[in-house]
Image (spheres, rainbow, N blue to C red):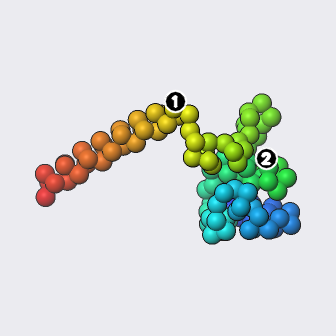
Amino acid sequence: MQHKGEIIEKAVRESGHSITKLAQKMGKSRRWVYQIFDSAVVPIDYIIEIGKIIHYDFSEDIKGIKMYGSDRPMPSVEDSRFTGKASSKEAEHWKEKYMNLLEKYNDLLSKQKNID
């Protein structure tokens, strides 16, 4: 399995971009950037966004990026995932997922209570 964080770290360091500037452009902390470097699994959206910021194409280094080619719009920092502003449809989708998960969790808790 590829260690995506190491690949990202190498590209960032070779690009000459500072960690601080990268973190600011991502709307994250420097600590978050270092956590990405340490993580073997990094969401594709973050990889693409980092690539856009440092002007680096990760498609040759990381498997699976090619399917997110030019026909797919690349997310930007202004995207709802980074600003916290989501469309009502998207917000409703995640609310529904959360409620389903919460119900499953409560069911597990009640089953656990009955076992004890």
- N-term-proximal mark, 1 vs 2: 2
Position of residue 22 measured from the top left corner of the image (x, y, whole percent)? 75, 61
As drawn, the label of residue 28 is: none
Mark 1, other Cα within 10 Å: few <14 / some 14–19 / many ≥20: few
Position of residue 94 measured from the top left corner of the image (x, y, whole percent)? 47, 38
Taking the spot 29% from the left edge, 42% from the top edge, the residue there is 103
**Depicted 106 relative to depicted 11: above or below:** above
In the depicted view, which residue is nearer to us: 74 or 42? Answer: 74
CA distance separating discs 1 and 2: 31 Å
As drawn, the label of residue 89 is: 1
Helix, strand or loop status at disc 2: helix
**Contact, CB < 8 Å: mark 1 with mark 2?**
no
Position of residue 32 measured from the top left corner of the image (x, y, whole percent)? 62, 65
Q: Amino acid at mark 1?
A: Lys
**Depicted 65 relative to depicted 53: above or below:** above
Position of residue 16 measured from the top left corner of the image (x, y, whole percent)? 86, 66
In the depicted view, which residue is nearer to us: 78 or 49? Answer: 78
Q: Is residue 1 visible?
A: no
Judge left or right: residue 36 versus residue 89. Answer: right
Helix, strand or loop status at disc 1: helix
Taking the spot 40% from the left edge, 42% from the top edge, the residue there is 98
Q: Is residue 72 visible?
A: yes
As drawn, the label of residue 59 is: 2
Taking the spot 74% from the left edge, 33% from the top edge, the residue there is 72
Q: Amino acid at mark 2?
A: Ser
Judge left or right: residue 68 versus residue 108. Answer: right
In the depicted view, which residue is nearer to us: 61 or 90? Answer: 90
Quadrant into which the C terminus falls:
bottom left
Taking the spot 86% from the left edge, 63% from the top edge, the residue there is 15
